[in-house]
């Protein structure tokens, strides 16, 4: 008989390992928490964690419009070329 694995009774982090802070909203793109919430998570009470979880659904998601990348560079180059002719 194998021993029972150690389980914690605390509320788990909402982290989805997509850790990037959006420059405009200051929210993590993966879990929608602030940097302060992320940093304090391990020392928060269950009540604080529950309040944050309840608030996460009301936080606006990260903007879906891309700010750049290859497609944007190609479009800028194309419009620049067209304006020269």
Image: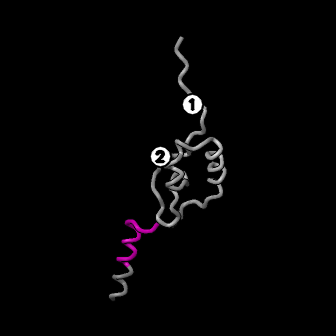
Does the CB distance between marks 1 and 2 fall below 8 Å?
A: no
Q: Residue drawn at (37%, 78%), measured in percent from left and top?
A: 78
Could you tell me residue 29's position as x and y percent? 50, 56
Q: Residues within 10 Å of mark 2 (few under 14, many from 20)?
A: few
Looking at this view, is 54 or 46 the one in front?
Answer: 46
Secondary element at tag 1: loop
Q: Residue drawn at (45%, 68%), measured in percent from left and top?
A: 67
Could you tell me residue 40's position as x and y percent? 52, 47
Earlier along the polypeptide chain: callout 1 or callout 2?
A: 1
Could you tell me residue 6's position as x and y percent? 53, 25
Q: Tell me the tag on residue 8.
A: 1
Distance between the Cα atoms at labels 1 and 2? 20 Å
Q: Residue drawn at (40%, 74%), measured in percent from left and top?
A: 75
Q: Residues within 10 Å of mark 1 (few under 14, many from 20)?
A: few
Secondary element at tag 2: loop
Is the magenta region chiefly helix, strand or loop?
helix
Quadrant of res 50: top right
The furthest residue to the top: 1
Question: In the image, is residue 69 part of the stretch drawn in magenta?
Answer: yes
Q: Which image quarter holds the N terminus? A: top right
Q: Is residue 52 left or right of residue 26?
A: right
Q: Residue drawn at (65%, 54%), measured in percent from left and top?
A: 55
Q: Which image quarter holds the C terminus? A: bottom left
Could you tell me residue 76's position as x and y percent? 38, 76
* Depicted 66 relative to depicted 33: above or below: below
* Depicted 7 relative to depicted 75: above or below: above
Looking at this view, is 69 or 60 the one in front?
Answer: 60
Q: Nearer the viewer, mark 1 or mark 2?
A: 1
Q: Which residues are magenta?
A: 66-78
Q: Which residue is mark 2?
A: 17
């Amino acid at each position: 008989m194998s021993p029972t694995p150690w389980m914690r009774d605390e509320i788990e982090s909402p982290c989805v390992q997509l850790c990037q802070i959006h420059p405009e909203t200051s929210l993590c793109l993966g879990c929608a928490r602030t940097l302060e919430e992320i940093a304090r998570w391990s020392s928060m009470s269950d009540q604080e964690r529950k309040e944050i979880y309840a608030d996460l659904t009301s936080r606006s998601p990260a903007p879906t419009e891309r700010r750049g990348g290859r497609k944007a560079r190609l479009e800028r180059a194309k419009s620049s070329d067209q304006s020269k002719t």
